[in-house]
Amino acid sequence: MTHCVPDTMQAVAIEAPGGPEVLRLVEQAVPQPADSEVLIRVSAAGVNRPDVLQRLGKYPLPPDASPLPGLEVAGEVVATGSGATRWQAGDRVMALTHGGGYAEYCSVNEGHCLSVPVSMTLVEAAAVPETYFTVWYNVFMCCRLSEGETFLVHGGSSGIGTTAIQLAKATGCKVLTTAGSDEKCRFCLDLGADTAINYRNDDWQAIVAERTNERGVDVLLDMVAGPYMQKNMELMARDGRYSIIAFLRGPSAELNMRIVLAKRLWITGSTLRPQSTQEKSAIAESLKDNVLPLLESRRVRPIIHETFPLANAAAAHELMESSRHMGKIVLAVDDAAMENTRND
């Protein structure tokens, strides 16, 4: 059955930089897919920290990006650009967007879409692209985490953390993580982490050193940076790979770099959004080959903390900023997605 695409849609816009209250439900024209794009009727959209930074006016947008927040969606393809050949109307997809996810319709490059496994709801699927693209690219494509290695991720109860823990365990690695409460640590252990450390109460550096028999970790994924950076380098094993993807404690630190030479460390970092269309498509292809089978079998799965209606995006942002959540926060864009929400 052909879906009739309306001229206008509901979307959540940022009225001006500020608190969650600046997110307002508005009516806008439905975007038209460019040559290599597909138009998705959005069932659900993921909420991520870059959305919060964009709302605060601290996340400069690429010039060709949608001004609407929202970096990942799941739904049904309803139209295709003249040069798009990978998908057809009716396909269920989850997609990394270039903004615009907080809306009933979103145009996305066809190469940035993945098929939604039959075992997965569209709400679950909306929690996949941003974190899985980020973790897979940084930890596996760049840092080459391999079976038998030791991996440390900070913020294990976050969307990135829950994804990293599961993928590292599925690869056959020893996994250590930090989190901000005993409850969050238990949550991380339930996901498969071998060690979870409450950084508010315990000396996480000493515990990681002890749990690795002073050898250190082979790969480290860091969203904290700032004062953690020197400690992280000291915890790396010889030939360790250290990936920085965010700066929750700031981008600056005084560092003694001798350890980089002594241990032959490799320090890298990236942000996902500025990467080229071709680079994002290459990540999607690698995910299709390596991760989609794990999602299909539910060996790994998106962990969803709470789902909000699109009109209540402000409450979703309040929860994100509180850091009370464990796992992902999702916006249900249509009524069917909200009714079929599954938090298992």
Image (tube, rainbow, N blue to C red):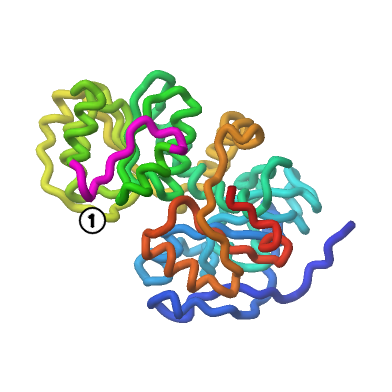
Residue 297 coordinates in the image, percent (x, y): 65, 32
Residue 312 coordinates in the image, percent (x, y): 55, 73
Q: Is residue 116 above or below residue 233?
A: below
The boundaries of the magenta stretch are 190-202
Query: Helix or strand or loop: what does disc 1 sit on?
Result: loop
- Residue at 71% x, 76% y is 8
Q: Is residue 77 above or below residue 111?
A: below
- Residue at 57% x, 66% y is 308
Q: Is residue 124 above or below residue 63?
A: above
- Residue at 37% x, 71% y is 57
Farthest residue to the top: give it: 148
Q: Quadrant of the N terminus?
A: bottom right
Residue 177 coordinates in the image, percent (x, y): 33, 38
Q: Is residue 5 above or below residue 305?
A: below
Q: Decide if residue 207 is on the left or right side of residue 142.
A: left
For this rendering, which residue is in front, 112 or 91? Answer: 91
Does 125 lie within the magenta span? no
The part of the image, by quadrant, that contains residue 187 is top left
Three-letter amino acid code of the residue under disc 1: Gly
The part of the image, by quadrant, that contains residue 264 is top left
| Residue 222 visible in the current orientation | no
Does 192 lie within the magenta span? yes
For this rendering, which residue is in front, 298 or 85? Answer: 298
Disc 1 target residue:
250
| Residue 293 visible in the current orientation | yes
- Residue at 42% x, 65% y is 52
